[in-house]
Image (cartoon, coloured by chain):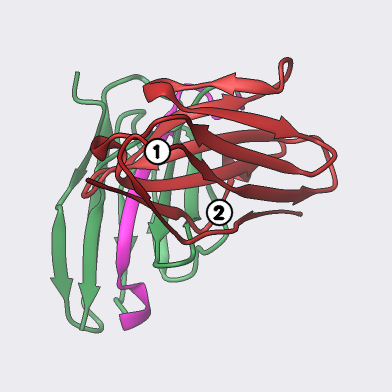
Chain colours: A green, B red
Amino acid sequence: NAGVTQTPKFQVLKTGQSMTLQCAQDMNHEYMSWYRQDPGMGLRLIHYSVGAGITDQGEVPNGYNVSRSTTEDFPLRLLSAAPSQTSVYFCASSPTGGDNSPLHFGNGTRLTVT
Amino acid sequence: AQSVTQLDSQVPVFEEAPVELRCNYSSSVSVYLFWYVQYPNQGLQLLLKYLSGSTLVKGINGFEAEFNKSQTSFHLRKPSVHISDTAEYFCAVSAGSARQLTFGSGTQLTVLP
């Protein structure tokens, strides 16, 4: 059982480049989310989805787009990368997004924007 | 609005010694509380959670936490730590659902031989 799979593990971009961070889960979870982790700031929610075709913004959505065409996949797109987007990105899922279900995290994507 | 404060960014402790990682929260409504652990180069894993009922919550790997409503705290404890407990620990609070989960800034626990 793979759980939550993120690719790539590492990525270096130049300012202005675009890329997509991939996230897939095989647990049939309805809720999926993207966080960024920065030193001393914990994890901050970028976007989330409560089911296929439904997405919404989190705490820090600017500069990021998401879509949810299937239950399994929840890609995060950076349209024009900026140095401020240098961070570690985590995808997480849970069965429903309710409080009784813990989040399952992927192993992260470490992104550097130069 | 809710917030979480982890009072110590780094906690070094010798192997087999007890440890307490402190977490305080603020919220205008009832909350649910969580501790997550992050081992190097991995994602976060749930350590334990408080939803309701007994204020003493036991989690995996011998960790426990106590919910103190009057002091708005949810400190994490372990009576005897191992080298393998070296990791970053995050306290988190939710007032309603996963999308309202707020994380603290993390505490790096380093267990020394």
For the N terminus of chain B, the quadrant is bottom right
Picture coordinates of residue B7, whole percent (x, y): 59, 58
Pick the front one: B61 or A110 = B61
Residue of label 2? B104
Check disc 1 and give the amino acid type: Ala
In the shown orientation, is residue A53 left or right of residue B102?
A: left
Residue of label 1? B17
The image shows residue B54, relative to residue A32, as above or below, that is above
The image shows residue A110, relative to residue A70, as above or below, that is below
Residue A18 in sight? no
Q: Residue at x 45, y 38 (%)?
A: B36
Chain of the residue that carries numbered disc 2 in the rendered image: B
- Magenta-span inclusion, residue A36: no
Q: Quadrant of residue A70?
A: top left
Q: Nearer the viewer, mark 2 or mark 1?
A: 1
Q: Secondary structure at mark 1?
A: loop
Q: Residue at x 53, y 42 (%)?
A: B20
The image shows residue A83, relative to residue A7, as above or below, that is below
In the shown orientation, is residue A19 left or right of residue B9?
A: left
Pick the front one: A51 or A61 = A61
Chain of the residue that carries numbered disc 1 in the rendered image: B
Q: CA distance from mark 2 to mark 1?
A: 24 Å
Range covered by the magenta-colored residues: A83-99
Picture coordinates of residue A36, whole percent (x, y): 40, 59
Disc number for residue A29: none
Q: Secondary structure at mark 2?
A: loop
